[in-house]
Each structure stands twice: as C-alpha cells, then as structure tokens.
Amino acid sequence: MIVTGMLLKANEARIVTLDGSRATHSLIAEKFNKLQLPKNPTQEDVAAFSQAFSAHCLANKVDKLVINRRATAGQGAGGAGTFLLEGVLLATSPAEVSFAHPQTLKATDRRAGDSKQQKPTTVDLGKAYDIAYEGLE
C-alpha cells in the first residue's frame, strides 16, 4: 500500500510518501516534499496546487492520503491557510483521504517508535512521516 502523509501548516503542505506496511516500509518520492499556496491565492494558484498533487498521486500510484487533523478551536487552531488546503485536497484528491489526530500520532510513536528508522530528521517532514505511517496497515 502506498500512503502519502501531509502536514498542513499555514499555506504549505509538507509531504512524505511511504510504500509497504508498518512492519516493513520505505520512503518513495523523496525529492517531492513540499507544496505551497500564496497567502491570497487565485483560482490559477489553487488549480496549479491541485494539479501538482494529483500528478504526484498518479506518478506514485498513491492509494491513500492522510492529513493532520486541524484544531478547530483554542490555541493553535488551524488558520485560513490550512482550511483552504484541506478543502482543496478533500475536493480534488484522486486517492482516499483520511485524518490523523495529534494524540493518535503520539500514542503510535510511543508504541511503535522502533519501526520508524527512515523517519526524516527535519521536524516538519518527520511529522508528515508520522502522519503517513498512520495510514499504513
């Protein structure tokens, strides 16, 4: 199974794509790790974002997209940028879309942290890796 994990943060999406299962998996498409929208996007900007992501999904035969669950209220609540990105992905993703809650990510990391040897060292890519890992079976 090929799973793409996306960390939505402001107007950008950090992307990690994994192939395999939780026990044995590998990183694919390592050069493709970030998509961005301008702060005030036009229709053309959104279309370009959507086309770039769809092309990634088709080129890598992505089966599932997992996105970080946005906070809807309180401190650290998702802003307009993440809301817009989430809507575009839900409307245009060629792959099945699911969400991963931050508490689930922490629990999985405590339970199965040993099997995450390929986790990128960059903080945002590491979080995207954790999100993708949630989608593996």
Image (cartoon, rainbow, N blue to C red):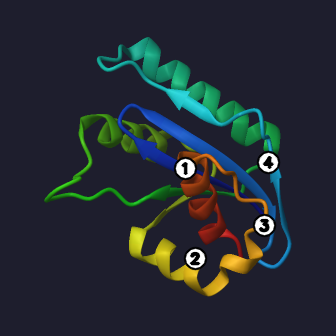
**First in sequence: mark 2 vs mark 3:** 2
What element does badge 4 sit on? loop
**Whole-Å distance between the Cαs marked 3 and 4?**
23 Å
**Whole-Å distance between the Cαs marked 2 and 3?**
12 Å
Residue located beneath label 3 in the image: 117
Residue located beneath label 4 in the image: 61
**First in sequence: mark 3 vs mark 4:** 4
What element does badge 1 sit on? helix
Residue at 45% x, 16% y is: 45
Q: What residue type is labelled 4?
A: Lys
What element does badge 3 sit on? loop
| Tag 1 and tag 3, C-beta contact below 8 Å | no
Determine which of the numbered discs, if any, sits on residue 109 in the image: 2
Q: Which amino acid does label 1 sit on?
A: Val
Residue in the foreground of this view, choosing between 42 and 31: 31
| Total numbered labels | 4
Examine the image and state in which quarter residue 81 appears. Answer: top left
**Whole-Å distance between the Cαs marked 2 and 4?**
26 Å
Q: Which amino acid does label 2 sit on?
A: Asp
Residue located beneath label 1 in the image: 123
**First in sequence: mark 4 vs mark 1:** 4
| Tag 2 and tag 1, C-beta contact below 8 Å | no
Position of the N terminus by quadrant = bottom right
Q: Is residue 101 in sight in this rendering?
A: no
**Whole-Å distance between the Cαs marked 4 and 1?**
26 Å
**First in sequence: mark 1 vs mark 3:** 3
Residue at 60% x, 87% y is: 111
Mark 3 burial class by Cα count in 10 Å: few <14, some 14-19, many 20+:
few
Position of the C terminus by quadrant = bottom right
What element does badge 2 sit on? helix
